[in-house]
Image: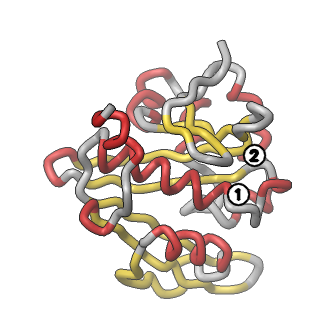
Amino acid sequence: MGHFQRMCGEKCYLSPPDDSDSERIKTWDNDLEVLLGASMDGVSTPASALHRTPGQAAKLLDHMMMIVDLETDTPIGWCALFYQIPANRHALLGIIIGDKSYWGRGYGEEAVRLILDYGFNVLNLNSVELGVYAFNRRAIRCYEKVGFRRIGVLRQARIVAGGAYDTILMDILASEFGESSVSGIIKQ
C-alpha cells in the first residue's frame, strides 16, 4: 500500500500506518532503549494497539501516524494524538523515533510540529498534553523548542534500574502554536 504524505515538513512527513508497519513497530516496541524513555509504563505504547483487537486498536489509533523520512520514504517512528476528550478539545501526545540513527537530528521536533499542526488545525483541538521522564533530556529540549510549557511534576513516578525519576507534565495551547501549514493549503 505505501505511505501517504498527510502532513509534510522539510525532513519528514506523517502518514497513516499501513499493514507493513506492524512488524517495524513491534521491533521498536521491543527495543528497551527506545521504549524506556517513551512509554508511560515502560511496557506499552499507543502503537502497541496494533497488536490488539480491531475495536481496541481503532479507538487508540484514530490519529496515529508514521513518521517517514522524506528523502528515503523510510518509516523512522510514529506519533499519535490519543485519549482525546472531544468536549474539552484536548488530547495526549505520544511519539517514538524508533530508528535510533535518526535521534538528535531534528526529526522528532519536526514530527511534533506536524502532529500539533494536524491536531490544532484539522482536529480543532485546544490543548495537547504530554508526560516526559526527567531523565529524557533530549525529549524535554525538543518539546520546549516546539512551545510546550511545564505544568507540573509527578514526583518519583518512574522507577527504573533502581532509580526514582520524576515525570514532567507539559502542555501547549492552540493559541501558543506557531504558523500552520494547514492554513496555507486553505488559502490556495
Residue beneath label 1, please? 35
The part of the image, by quadrant, that contains residue 22 is: top right
Q: Position of residue 112 (x, y in %)?
A: 52, 56
Q: Secondary structure at mark 1?
A: helix
Which residue is pictured at 51% across the width and 78% down the height?
Answer: 167
Left or right, 7 with reference to 27: left
- Dot 1 and dot 2 residues touching (CB under 8 Å): yes
Q: Position of residue 18 (x, y in %)?
A: 62, 22
Left or right, 145 with reference to 184: right
Residue beneath label 2, please? 28
Name the disc covering residue 158, or none: none
Q: How far is mark 1 from mark 2, CA to CA?
A: 7 Å
Q: Residue type at mark 1: give it.
A: Leu
The part of the image, by quadrant, that contains residue 63 is: top left
Q: Nearer the N terminus, badge 1 or badge 2? A: 2
Which residue is pictured at 66% across the width and 75% down the height?
Answer: 136
Q: Position of residue 163 (x, y in %)?
A: 70, 86
Seen from the viewer's position, the closer of residues 161 and 6 is 6
Is residue 110 positioned above or below 151 on the image?
above
Q: Secondary structure at mark 2?
A: helix
Is the N terminus in the top left, top right, bottom left or bottom right quadrant? Answer: top right
